[in-house]
Amino acid sequence: MKKDFSRGRRTGLAAALAWTAAGPWLRAHADTYPAKPLRLVVPFPPGGPTDAVSRIIAADWQARLGQPVLVDNKSGAVGFIGHEEVRKSAPDGYTLLALVVPAVINYQFLGKTFLLPRDFTAIGMTYTQYNVLIVNPQAKGMAEVTTVAQLLAVARATPDGLSYTSAGNGSLGHLTVARLTNLTGVRMVHVPYRGAAPAINDVLAGQVPVMFADSTTAGPHIRSGKLRAIAVTSAQRVAELPQVATLIEQGYAGQVVTPWYGLAAPAGTPADIVARLATALKATVAQPEVQDKLRALGLTPQYMPPDEFTAFVNREFEVWSKVIRDNQIVVAI
């Protein structure tokens, strides 16, 4: 897949020239920032976890920054439309982006690269999440499966390959299984759905026996006993499922998958404004009430400052881009 590096250089140069031209005005107004409402662009429709967390932050920031923060859902092209809306905005700190891993991964499917701070200016991370490998114990061959090794043994013994589902072709659940099968050499057959809800509904119905799902989607069904968790993708065990071993504990090195959420601003946003926003975000994530709201959504509060978040996001793009290339995954967007 061809990568448009020239576009990236042009974008970076344009941002630099824009900052040079606007610099005196921005510096003159930095001391009074924010002097008007902020807009937080969510690149997905209302109702999902990205939207919910954005509204939690917006509510906290209104009191913290002294200005309303308006959540603006700009969905389409699996996040790219919202990204472009922010990328083309003035780098003045008044237009921000809810940055999440699926939208970053999708740049690869668009034949583009993603790089901070060339494309955006990082403000910081807000939360991480874990994915969980689930099976329907009522499905054929799944009654005794309680570990990944047992699941892979069933997959090896299935002539046409054991089926698994995900929220869609190119989704994090799809890529996680692809990386695991690359490591183990076990063939599994992907059955993609349009979203996590219809996918897990068919796991519950026994149509497809296996899925890597996010903790928010899978949690209620695990607690009810309808689905069985056999691994979590976090680096350590999670408090909600203390009996479930991680992939690493089960012998699958490097298999850490943590969906995440952070905030970003247009490239070239002044450092003092970024620092103000990063300080506000850190304080928000530290609030017990905010932490309770995030945990209620199945999320783990975790602040990460701009520099660390920048390096983290860039690594994420490279890791998942390699999985996409190695498995020749193509998604029409």
Image (tube, rainbow, N blue to C red):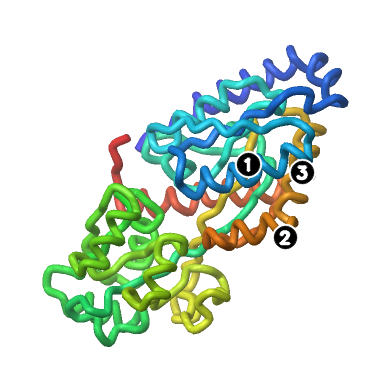
The image quadrant that residue 181 belongs to is: bottom left
Q: Position of residue 102 (x, y in %)?
A: 45, 46
Query: What amino acid type should be assigned to the residue bearing mark 3?
Result: Ala
The image quadrant that residue 135 belongs to is: bottom left
**Residue under label 3:** 280
Query: What amino acid type should be assigned to the residue bearing mark 2?
Result: Pro
Please tell me how crowded label 1 is: few (under 14), some (14-19), or many (20+) other residues with Cα within 10 Å: many
**Residue under label 2:** 288
Q: CA distance from mark 3 to mark 1?
A: 11 Å
Query: What amino acid type should be assigned to the residue bearing mark 1?
Result: Leu
- Residue at horizontal 46%, vertical 47%? 48
Which label's residue is closer to the chain start, 2 or 3? 3
Contact, mark 3 vs mark 1 (Cβ under 8 Å): no
With 110 as the anchor, is 99 left or right in this view? Answer: right
Q: Residue furthest left?
A: 159
- The secondary structure type at the circle numbered 2 is helix
Which quarter shows the C terminus?
Answer: top left
- Residue at horizontal 82%, vertical 15%? 24
Q: Position of residue 9 (x, y in %)?
A: 56, 25
Query: Between residues 192 and 254, which one lies in front from this camera angle?
Result: 192
Q: Position of residue 280 (x, y in %)?
A: 77, 43
With 122 as the anchor, is 178 left or right in this view? Answer: left
Which label's residue is closer to the chain start, 1 or 2? 1
- Residue at horizontal 69%, vertical 31%? 68
**Residue under label 1:** 263
Q: CA distance from mark 2 to mark 3?
A: 15 Å
**Position of 200 relative to 81 (above/below):** below
